[in-house]
Image (cartoon, grey):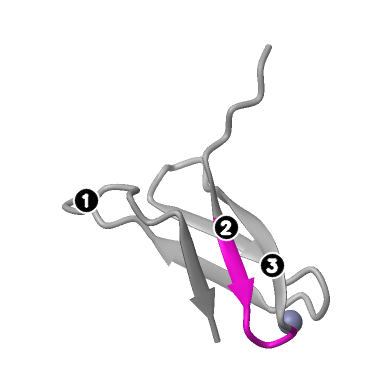
Amino acid sequence: MVDERPFLGVLFRCCGVYSRIYRTQDETAYAGRCPRCARPVRVVIDARSGVDVRFLEVY
Ligand SMILES: [Zn+2]
C-alpha cells in the first residue's frame, strides 16, 4: 500500500525551517507542527481554489 498522503510544503517563519504538513483525515485542512518549536499550524483547504497552493509561509 503506497502512502500518498497529500502534503503542503511550509516555511515556518518562527524558526526559519522548511517542513511538510499533511492533510487531515476529514480532508478539510492541512495540519502539522513546526519541527523545532512545535508551533501548531493549520491550513484550511479552500473549496474554490482547491489544493493548488503547494508552498506557503506561516508566522
Ligand atoms: Zn518554530
Is 28 left or right of 48, judged from the image as shown? Answer: right
For marks 1 and 2, the one nearer the N-term is 2
Residues at marks 1 and 2, CA–CA distance in whole angstroms: 19 Å
Q: Are marks 2 and 3 in contact (CB under 8 Å)?
A: yes
Q: Is mark 2 within 8 Å of ligand 1?
A: no
- Residue 41 at x, y percent in the picture: 57, 71
For marks 2 and 3, the one nearer the N-term is 2
Question: Is label 3 in a helix, a strand or a loop?
Answer: strand
Camera-near label (1 vs 2) is: 2
- Residue 50 at x, y percent in the picture: 26, 48
Place residue 14 in its image quadrant. Answer: bottom right
The N terminus lies in which quarter of the figure? top right
For marks 1 and 3, the one nearer the N-term is 3
Is 10 colored magenta in this rendering? yes
Q: Residue at x 64, y 56 (%)?
A: 20
**Quick one: which residue is furthest to the top in this view?**
1
Place residue 15 in its image quadrant. Answer: bottom right
Camera-near label (1 vs 3) is: 3
- In this rendering, the answer to whether 28 lies above or below 57 is above
Label 2 Cα crowd, 10 Å radius (few <14 / some 14-19 / many 20+):
some
Q: Are marks 1 and 3 in contact (CB under 8 Å)?
A: no
Which residue is labeled 1 in the image? 47
Q: Magenta stretch?
A: 9-15
Residues at marks 1 and 3, CA–CA distance in whole angstroms: 25 Å
Which residue is labeled 3 in the image? 18
Q: Residue at x 51, y 67 (%)?
A: 42
Place residue 2 in its image quadrant. Answer: top right
Q: Residue at x 71, y 82 (%)?
A: 16
- Residue 11 at x, y percent in the picture: 61, 72
Residues at marks 2 and 3, CA–CA distance in whole angstroms: 7 Å
Which residue is labeled 2 in the image? 9
Q: Amino acid at mark 1?
A: Ala
